[in-house]
Image (cartoon, rainbow, N blue to C red):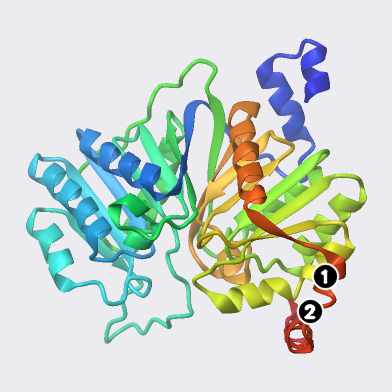
Amino acid sequence: MALARQRGYSRNVALRDFLKRWRGPLPAYVEGNRSELLIDGGAFFDAVVALIQSAQHYVCLEFYIVTADSTGWRIAEALVERAKAGVEVAFSYDWYGSVGLDDEYIQYLEAAGVKVLAFGQPSLRKMVWPWGRRNHRKLVIADGRVGIVGGLNLAAEYDAQERGGGNWRDTAVRVEGPVVADLELMFRRLWARQKGKKLSSTPTRAEPFPGGDPVYFYGNYARRDRAFIRRAYLQAILSAQRTVRITNAYFIPDRVLRRALTRAAQRGVQVEVIVAGATDVPPALLASRAFYPQLLKGGVGVFEFHERVLHAKTAVIDGEWSTIGSSNLDYWSSYVNLEVNAAILGRRVGGAMEDQFSLDRQRSQQIRPESWGDRPLKERLMDWMLRTFFRWY
């Protein structure tokens, strides 16, 4: 990319050169968008509330976990205020992910005119298994012009410490521009498929910003596109020339992804992965650790983040291709759950992503091959058993 700029290539031509290194069909990036990273819950929830309050025609939300705590009620109050002002509010949550959500919370929303949809709610006619397909997406859209996607749920665990939250380490992105119409289409298609109350609002498409970021929203949905996010990661890793930097809370990559990472490292690409050392799902960390020997042997740098719970799902390749969203690098996100990520091209966002990765890496513990092999026998036996279990994966 630096060489392209030295030769006088325009910004857009240089970005297309990066895309040409991808293997497989090129995604339909939409140019002319403004993108802003939202680091941790303080920035995220402030942006969500501000976006809801700015809505003039309609606002759409989709979350996996919704909790009737201080953070959940803060969002509910903002939605009710807009609904009472005549704005159409469509609110979807995953029934299983939000098990235990107070009926009072839903009644409060519906009494104000908010249209509520519980994804995957079992009924007498339709049994839904908890480990089946879940809606793991986290997104907010207002008036077809601004969208937010990321890894944060509507719960106090993700909120800032000064607001009484758990201060989990997570990342989202706010995007303004014409590409938001594509994110809205994902929401409306699922809403209609799940037979939510009819939406009266008309979808709109924002005008592009000159010189804005090329952005693409991509997700796992329907049977045909259930592994789309995994393929996007593979294409980006296979095309990498300088750096691959991944931060993922539940890092349980399948053998093809693991091989892509080690092959990238062996051809001279600096490959680094930050995994959640402090986690809300300890079995996921044990599963991640089972793959450390293969990754370390292949030249991949592995780091564990122990400062606080890590829940982010991001990556930046060559400082040019960035992805932020809801998808973990595990079987369920790759093949089962509904997910959504934003892919953004360009050095402006890519540079900010690399800066954040560097900060997280400084706060992490590096896993070194020599010390990893000297751990207690009990821990090494656990790794061996898990590797044996995941031989098919």
Labels 2 & 1 near each other (Cβ < 8 A)? yes
Where's residue 83, x and y in %?
13, 46
**Residue sitting at the far right:** 267
Q: Which residue is mark 1?
A: 371
The relative height of residue 285 versus residue 157 in the rendered view (above or below) is below
Q: Which residue is mark 2?
A: 375
Q: In terms of image quadrants, where is residue 58?
A: top left
Quadrant position of the N terminus in the picture: top right
Q: Residue at x 83, y 39 (%)?
A: 241
Q: Is residue 230 at all visible to an observer of this figure? A: yes
Q: Which amino acid does the dot numbered 1 rest on?
A: Ser
Q: Residue at x 14, y 58 (%)?
A: 109
Q: Which of the two residues, 302 or 335, is positioned nearer the viewer here?
A: 302
The relative height of residue 59 versus residue 116 in the rendered view (above or below) is above
Q: Is residue 236 at all visible to an observer of this figure? A: no
**3D distance between C-alphas at marks 2 and 1:** 7 Å
Crowd band around label 1 with a 10 angstrom C-alpha radius: few (<14), some (14–19), many (20+):
few
Q: Which amino acid does the dot numbered 2 rest on?
A: Arg
Crowd band around label 2 with a 10 angstrom C-alpha radius: few (<14), some (14–19), many (20+):
few
Q: In the image, 304: left or right of 157?
A: right
Q: In the image, 162: left or right of 150?
A: left
Where's residue 42, x and y in %?
37, 46
